[in-house]
Amino acid sequence: MKTKKAIKIFTLLVVIINIASIVFVDFFYSQIVRLASSILFLLLFVFYKIKDKNLIAFICLLIVADAFDLYYNQPFIVEIYSVIKMSAFFLLCINLYKKIRHQKLGNSITGLFITVVIINILIGYKAVSEISTLLEYSQLLSIQLYWMVCVFSGALAAKFYFCNDSDKAVYFVAFTFLFIFTDLSGFIANFFEAYIFFYFERVLYFLGFMTLGYYLFFTSKAEIKHN
């Protein structure tokens, strides 16, 4: 319980600092603050001796993506950023698949899942098509592929929740969707010039780290009890 409270307080401080950085410094330095904050979360998890290697690797890839995002105006950065994020969410998909590969949903819910996945992929295709004149073909393709991986990871996380009605499943689905909506907010802010979404991006991103921390510590605590 103390650990969850510490993560919550730490997240609140990080969110306040990041929102202040958007207001008071230029965008480049604001991105540095975001990167530093991500690294601090990783150090926090390492300090508490979290052992889930897949999710630690997931966090490391998020941090690497943040580092590349500092140079967003350079050639091929959009493609590199998308590939790194795809790799992160692909790891997440593998993690989820291992948990739910033997679990089945009813036919009606499975049909609903497939429909939602298709609709979200089409929405992503339509949204990216709206900015096709602003980007190179390789950039458009990398964003589309990244969105597809995000949709599949979200679907797997939702299935994990439906098959495992527990706090652990709630935390997993929460941080998965929070990280997906983080980049969706960044996409809207950058390409549709709705700059208010930069604030949503920062808040959602660190709430994602908070719920990821809840999941990691919940799992770690369960392993200790099991042993």
Image (cartoon, rainbow, N blue to C red):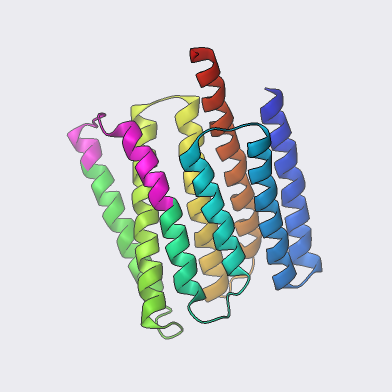
Does the rendering let one see residue 143?
yes
Position of residue 197 measured from the top left corner of the image (x, y, whole percent): 60, 63
- Residue at 18 percent across and 35 percent down: it is 107
Residue 116 versus residue 210 in the image, above or below: below
The rendered magenta stretch, by its main secondary structure, is classed as: helix
Q: Is residue 44 left or right of residue 66?
A: right
In front of the other: 40 or 169: 40
Measuring 59% from the left and 51% from the top, which residue is drawn there?
A: 204
Residue 3 spot, x, y in % from top left: 69, 28
Q: Is residue 95 left or right of residue 106?
A: right
Q: Residue 189 occupies which quadrant of the picture?
A: bottom right
Q: Quadrant of the N terminus?
A: top right
Magenta region, residue range: 89-110
In reply to whether residue 107 is colored magenta, the answer given is yes
| Residue located at (56% from left, 39% from top) | 212
Task: Please state if 42 lies on the left or on the right of 122 as rendered.
Answer: right
